[in-house]
Amino acid sequence: MMVLVKGEGNRGWLFVKPFNKKMWLVTALVMIYTTLIVWFLERQSNPEFGGPWKNQISTALWFTFCTLFFSQREKIQSNYSRIVVALWLFVVFVVTSSYQASLTSMLTVPRLVPNITDVSWLIKTNAPVGCDGDSFVKNYLKQVLEFSPANIKNISSQYSYPDAFRSGNITAAFLELPYLKVFLKENHGYQVSGPTYRFGGLGFVFQKGSPIVDDVSEAILMMSENGKLKDLEDKWFNGSMSNTATDIGTNGLGLESFWDLYIISLVISTVSLLLFLLVGLKNYLSLGRFSRNFGNWSNLFQTLRRRQVVYPSQVPTLNSVPQLGAWSGRG
């Protein structure tokens, strides 16, 4: 199906379009996971991540959010946290650079999108469509796609399609793939939209019993195997189904471009957390063996209590200090 292209409409939410929905969702999840890891690693040793629970969570979220702009101010004390944050900053650098490049291209290059993308919409609205009345396409539209015969307009020549579109005589056109590529090569403002229905394609017809049938078939097969046909197609049709140089994908960057970075970040964060827990468990067991030398924990606490410095309960004030004249020489 070939349709006219139009300029992009509402650009108010253009800043979210460089990434698709899955990319935004996974980025948010990885960010939250990194926030929890940094908070857990820093909450005991870093006073900036201490305090009540609400303050701890808000500080961790604010720290991770600021890393998106490389403006974090909280100091990191744990070596495990430094590893996690360093890798996260690299991921942020790659993701933000890609976002800025994609957003810049959307803002500076006009985007052209097809005005119709759904064949079923054409059928439901009884929109007129055009095709070559002498080809099998007309029967396919009526019998398979179930277009109304009254809505199918016969276009005698490929040079008549631009006038039919401009006059509103047709809303979309259905052409065979070779003719479609030739039309897009010679005309601008059109684009392929919707699904592509594939058939056997074009062929050469020879007289029955012709001796050159096998030779031509073998030659075509050899050109298909060695890539010569693909080179010819790219040369004459630019290897594209669109004639608009400013056509940019409307779905945005996807997760397939960044999933390896996200996986590495998650693995490193998880390994750092496990190492932190193992070291903590080792220290806990060592402390337990140390406490057994005192018999039990109560003996340890009693020993520490006996070593405490006892301060006076009441600190003398200036009023309770004798005057200078009251002091004796011996005193």
Image (tube, rainbow, N blue to C red):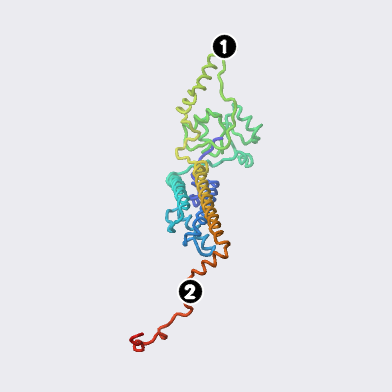
Q: Is residue 94 left or right of residue 117?
A: left
Q: Which is more N-terminal, label 1 or label 2?
A: 1
Residue 77 vertical placement versus 18 (above, below)? below
Q: In the image, what residue type sits under mark 2? A: Val
Q: Position of residue 244 (x, y in %)?
A: 46, 37
Tell me the element at label 1.
loop
Please give the label number shown on residue 210.
Answer: 1
Q: Position of residue 288 (x, y in %)?
A: 55, 57
Q: In the image, is 109 to the left or to the right of 158?
A: left
Residue occupying the point 53% across, 58% down: 290
Which type of secondary structure does the marked residue at label 2 adopt?
loop
Closer to us: 110 or 256: 256
Residue under numbered circle 2: 310
- Residue nearer the viewer, 283 or 179: 283
Nearer to me, 326 or 109: 326
Instruction: Kindly report the distance in space between the C-alpha atoms of the residues bearing marks 2 and 1.
Output: 117 Å
